[in-house]
Image (cartoon, helix red, strand yellow):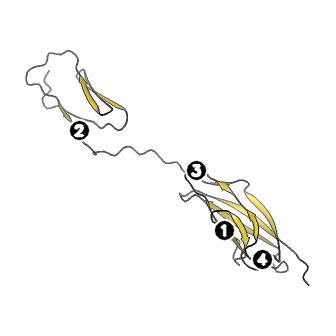
Amino acid sequence: MALTGYVLDFIALDGTVALSLDGGVDTVSGGTLSRSVASQPWQAGDQLMLRIRKGSAAPTPKPTVNTAPAFDPGSYSFSVAENAAVEAAVGTVAATDPDEGDTVTYSITAGNDTGKFAIGSSSGQVTVASTLNYESVSSYTLTVEASDGNGGKDGASVTIKVVDVVEC
């Protein structure tokens, strides 16, 4: 059997790679190449050529699965006195993200056109952002979004009831 001119190209990405050529087996494991050959009548001048290319191929990337954060519950209800000070806490929303290393951030995406409320981007704490007046508006419905920074998002409804306070 003449092997002259045969070229074996292979890439070992993980573990062990085995190739066979006419009954022989090449094995790469832990950086060591070995060749075993079935008993054959080798002729003088037969050649086996092995080409190893460093960095000629990128490892196959593993797919990244991003799970969106989720609010539980999906809706919240809070109340706040109409005379609450600016920056007073109204309540806290919370979403969890099962993906390791993801940080959930919060924002108000709807229902806050007059800017009466704010939310801590990392805490989820809803606070009063400007003076409230029960006689003008007695209830607000906000949409709050939780984002993981990797495209995963979830929304929750937040109803805030303004409580009337006797004014002197």
Q: Is the residue 35 above or below the residue 166 in the image?
A: above
**At x 30% / y 45%, what residue is drawn?**
57
For marks 4 and 1, give the one nearer the viewer.
Answer: 4
Secondary structure category for the residue under label 3: loop
**Mark 1, residues whose alpha carbon is within 10 Å: few (<14), some, or many (≥20)?**
many
- Judge the density around disc 3: few (<14), some (14-19), many (≥20) Cα neighbours within 10 Å: some
| Residue at horizontal 12 percent and vertical 29 percent from the top | 4
Mark 1: amino acid: Ile
Q: Is residue 14 above or below residue 61?
A: above
First in sequence, mark 1 or 3: give its number: 3
Instruction: Return the disc, 4 or 3, that comes first in the chain's sequence.
Output: 3
Disc with the residue nearer the chain's start (4 vs 2): 2
Provide the residue designation for mark 1: 108
Residue located beneath label 4 in the image: 85
Residue at numbered disc 2: 52
Graded by Cα atoms within 10 Å as few (under 14), some (14 to 19) or many (20 or more), the crowding at tag 4 reads: some
In the image, what residue occupies the spot 13% across and 19% down?
42
Disc on the earlier residue, 4 or 1: 4
Type of the residue with mark 3: Thr
Q: Quadrant of residue 159?
A: bottom right
Query: What residue is pinned by disc 3?
Result: 67
